[in-house]
């Protein structure tokens, strides 16, 4: 994983070079494929705090994901 590269204020690009392992248990086979991607991230506003107790499970997941004040807005294959 690369260091974040500043694209413009509040936006970054991170390059990830990796392999994905796919296992087929029925056939007993394994396959490795390259999973090389560029992730584009942007700063987002802090979510409202605290999260209401009446929040749905989906709202809770979104809230936890946005706590880092970043979101992925684009993923590209290399």
Image (cartoon, grey):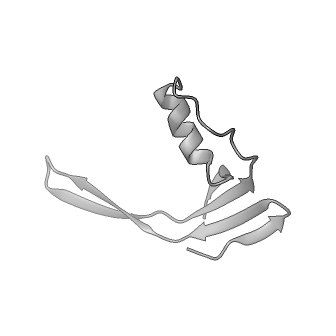
Looking at the rendered image, the quarter that the C terminus falls into is: bottom right
Q: For residue 29, what is the image quadrant?
A: bottom left
Q: For residue 15, what is the image quadrant?
A: bottom right
Q: Which residue is more in the foreground, 30 or 72?
A: 72
Q: Which residue is more in the foreground, 33 or 46?
A: 46
Q: Which residue is more in the foreground, 64 or 74?
A: 64
Q: Which residue is more in the foreground, 74 or 47?
A: 47
Q: Position of residue 48 (x, y in %)?
A: 69, 38
For the point 73% across and 72% down, the residue is 5
Eyeballing the image, is 59 above or below 11?
A: above
Eyeballing the image, is 8 above or below 48?
A: below
Looking at the rendered image, the quarter that the N terminus falls into is: bottom right
Residue 60 placement, left or right of 10: left
Residue 15 placement, left or right of 18: right
For the point 74% across and 64% down, the residue is 12
For the point 74% across and 49% down, the residue is 44
Q: Position of residue 14 (x, y in %)?
A: 64, 67
Eyeballing the image, is 33 above or below 55?
A: below
Q: Position of residue 35 (x, y in %)?
A: 48, 63
In the rendered picture of this protein, how many numbered marks are placed on residues? 0
Q: Residue furthest right?
A: 9
Q: Position of residue 59 (x, y in %)?
A: 55, 31
For the point 78% across and 60% down, the residue is 11
């Amino acid at each position: 994983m690369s260091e974040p590269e500043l694209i413009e204020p509040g936006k970054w690009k991170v390059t990830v070079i990796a392999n994905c392992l796919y296992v087929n248990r029925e056939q007993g086979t394994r396959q490795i494929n390259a999973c090389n991607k560029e992730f584009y991230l942007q700063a987002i506003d802090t979510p409202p705090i605290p999260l209401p107790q009446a929040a749905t499970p989906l709202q809770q997941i979104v809230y936890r994901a946005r706590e880092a004040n970043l979101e992925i807005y684009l993923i590209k294959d290399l």
